[in-house]
Amino acid sequence: MSLKAETRLVVPIEKPRRNLWRRIRQRPEVILSPLVLVVFLAIWEWVSTSGLVSPVILPAPPKVFRGILTLVKASWFPQHLWTTTIETVLGFCIAGASAFTMAVFLHQVPLLRRVIYPYVVTLQVMPMIVLAPIFVVWFGFGITSKVVVSVTTAFFVVLVNSLAGLAAVPENSLLLMRSMVATRRQVLFKLTIPTSLPYVFAGLKTAATLALIGSLVGEFVTAEKGLGRLLTQFSFALKQDLVFATVIWVGVLGLALYGIVSFLEKKLVWWR
């Protein structure tokens, strides 16, 4: 009886340990990713405190963390964060919707696509960031000019990816739809667009970060509010701890937008 009791006590303890190690072996990145962050912060701390780099240029992580808390507690910070968020979301939504609509239209009219696509490529290789001062003159110093910069920065990546996705329909699938006497509208909405969605969302995930970059660039040129405005002010004042803290907040905002798009992709492109 005593051996059975000991066995009953040992099995529940050892089994979770085996399951834990099995999961770690299957997904080692669960351990390695946090470890990389810890090593990076340790090297950063050592470089900042050893005198290799001046603290004015590279503040230590604890000082940056205190800068993050300073921004969180500041009464003026939420309006700057909210302004950049609104500019980015508006720019992303307008760019995504207009680019996908234009891609579908160009796909349905091949001649128009062959005429316009060279200009699309030309505009894509031209950095929209250099047009930010022009947009500020055209649309004023308010939020509109920043949204326009955000739209133009994120537009072409969605357009190009959408065109590639619309053209990636397998020929056998098209022949099957035609053999079933499907109309052009049915082919578009039941085959072409669903097939293109993985490409579209790949472009949208990139566009989410580009829209944020566009908003920040517009705020660098001229703005009364926004994270880009804070970065400019803190940089001129040599408050590097607040500069790094603002950069971290920009990264958090970018990750949030990317995560939302990824979540929508899992819900809409469920077959992947």
Image (cartoon, helix red, strand yellow):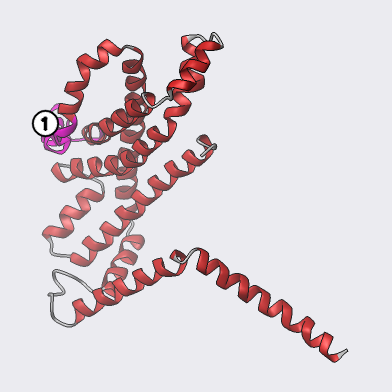
Q: Quadrant of the N terminus?
A: bottom right
Across and down, in percent, residue 271 comes to 54, 36
The verdict on residue 252 being magenta is no
Tell me, yes or no, if residue 76 can be seen here: no
The residue type indicated by label 1 comes to: Ile
Residue in the picture at 29% in, 49% down: 80
Q: Nearer the viewer, residue 126 or 22?
A: 22
Quadrant in the rendering for residue 196? top left
- Farthest bottom residue in view: 2
Q: Residue 128 in magenta? A: yes
How crowded pointer 1 is (Cα within 10 Å; few <14, some 14-19, many 20+) is rated as: few
- At x 16% / y 46%, what residue is drawn? 220
Q: Nearer the viewer, residue 141 or 68?
A: 68
Q: Is residue 211 above or below residue 25?
A: above
Query: Quick check: can you spot residue 116?
Result: yes
Residue 33 x/y as whole percent: 40, 66
Q: How many marks?
A: 1
| Image quadrant where residue 244 sits | bottom left
* Magenta highlight range: 124-144
Residue 184 horizontal side relative to residue 109, left or right: right
| Residue at 38% over, 46% down | 258
Residue position for label 1: 134
Q: Is residue 218 left or right of residue 20?
A: left
User: Main SS type for the magenta part?
Assistant: helix
**Local SS, label 1:** helix
Q: Is residue 157 left or right of residue 135?
A: right
Answer left or right for 101 relative to 46: right
Q: Position of residue 264 (x, y in %)?
A: 48, 39
Closer to us: 248 or 8 = 8
> Where residue 88 sits: x, y (%)?
31, 40
Residue at 73 percent across and 79 percent down: it is 11
